Structures are given as structure tokens and as C-alpha cells.
Amino acid sequence: MKTITFATLLFSLAITGCQQQQDTDINTVTIALEKSDRALGGYIEKLESEFTPEDIRTQIICKDYPHEYKTNYAPNMLKLSSKYTEAVLLSDLDRILDFYKAKDQVSC
């Protein structure tokens, strides 16, 4: 009887501990995704501003935006949502970059 009670208690604690770890992991990924989303939003604001110099636009379009998207945003989005695939996210990135390359006449 004591063995069954102890095993049940141990099993319950193990499940609870795993659940808390998953919640912590999800919170960490969510925070990282929100930070990356803010950075990408800042880049878009600069690209939409008429006061942003051409060299800054080129830096954002060719280096900063793709780097942030590929190294932070896309991996965290893949961790949080099963409805996105790497191909879909990269396609979205290409579409965004193509728009701003054409709009600002930037060649990388």
C-alpha cells in the first residue's frame, strides 16, 4: 500500500515538474518573439519614414532585417506555432524584402 501511494506521489510530482518547465520554456520563447517583433517593427518604421537616409535603408533591407528575422523571429515562431513552416516564414521574408527593395530601389 505504501509503495503504491509513494509511486503515485512521485509520478504526480514528475508531471507537475515537467509542466512547470514547459510553461517556463513557452514564456521564454514568447518574450524572445515579442522582442524580435519589436525590433522588426522598428525597422519597418524606419523604412516607412521619409527621413531615413538611403544608406540606413540599404543596411536594414540587406542585413539587419533578414538577420533578425532568420536568427530570432522565425525560430521562435516555429517553436510556438505548428501552423507555420520554415518555408512559409522564408517566403514571407522574401515578400517583405522584395517590396522594400522595389520601393526604395535597393540592390543587395
Image (cartoon, grey):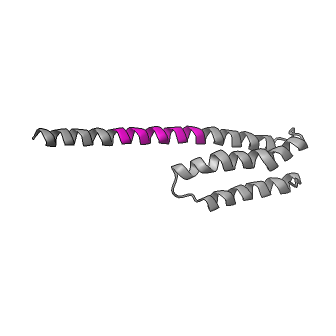
- Residue 31: quarter of image: top right
Q: Is residue 21 magenta?
A: yes
| In the displayed structure image, the side of residue 85 where residue 13 appears, left or right | left
Magenta span: predominant SS is helix
Question: Which one is in front, 19 or 101?
Answer: 19
| In the displayed structure image, the side of residue 53 where residue 38 appears, left or right | left
| In the displayed structure image, the side of residue 63 where residue 69 appears, left or right | left
Specify the farthest residue to the left. 1
Question: Which one is in front, 92 or 66?
Answer: 66
Q: Is residue 96 magenta?
A: no
- Residue 89: quarter of image: bottom right
Residue drawn 25% across the image and 39% down it:
10
Figure check: 96 above or below 18:
below
Residue drawn 66% across the image and 39% down it:
38
Counting labels gives: 0
**Which quadrant: the N terminus?**
top left
- The x, y position of residue 18, in whole percent, is 37, 42
- The x, y position of residue 74, in whole percent, is 62, 51
Question: Which one is in front, 104 or 59?
Answer: 59
Specify the farthest residue to the front. 3
Residue drawn 49% across the image and 38% down it:
27
Magenta segment range?
Answer: 17-33
Residue drawn 57% across the image and 57% down it:
84
- The x, y position of residue 100, in whole percent, is 81, 53
**Which quadrant: the C terminus?**
bottom right
- The x, y position of residue 53, in whole percent, is 89, 40
